[in-house]
Image: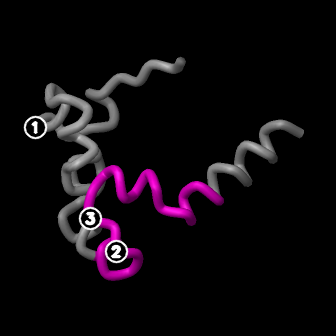
Amino acid sequence: MTSIDLNRVLDKAWSDKPLAEVLAAPVAALKGVSDRDGELLKEAFGVETVADLADLKYVRWAQALATLEAAK
């Protein structure tokens, strides 16, 4: 299992929250994602939470393609 430094990926207000709460948080909880970015993700893909973004099929497809390329 890989560990992740939550301080590097979450806004300060979210870095000490339980993981279940972070997954239910708006995508703006992710460092570098603005409230406006969150609005646009909701409009374009119906993404409202961090969990929604993680489960977005386009994200998973892109990750799979990157993994295939890295395995070459």
Q: Find residue 11 and report its horizontal and vertical position in percent.
A: 20, 40
Of tags 1 and 3, which is closer to the observer? 3
Percent position of residue 46, x then y: 34, 74
Instruction: Look at mark 2 in the image and give the residue it sits on.
Output: 46
Residue extending farthest to the front is 20
Amino acid on which the number 3 mark rests in the picture: Glu
Residue 5: x and y, percent? 35, 23
> What residue sits 40% from the left and 75% below the top?
45
Q: How many labels does the image show?
A: 3
Residue type (three-letter) at the residue carrying disc 2: Gly
Please tell me in which quadrant of the rendered image residue 34 appears: bottom left
* Residue at the image position 80 percent from the left and 46 percent from the top: 68
Given the current orientation, which residue lies at the most extreme right position? Answer: 72
- To which residue does mark 1 refer? 13
Residue type, numbered disc 1: Ala
Instruction: Characterize the magenta stretch by its predominant secondary structure.
Output: helix
Q: Is mark 3 on a helix, strand or loop?
A: loop
Magenta segment: does it hold 52?
yes
Which is in the foreground here, disc 2 or disc 1? 2
Q: Residues within 10 Å of mark 2 (few under 14, many from 20)?
A: some
* Residue 22, image quadrant: top left
Q: Judge whether 21 appears above or below 25 on screen.
A: above
Dot 1: within a 10 Å radius of its alpha carbon, few (fewer than 14), some, or many (20 or more) residues? few
Q: Residue beneath label 3, please? A: 48
Residue 46 vertical placement versus 11 (above, below): below
Label 2 secondary element = loop
Range of magenta residues: 40-61
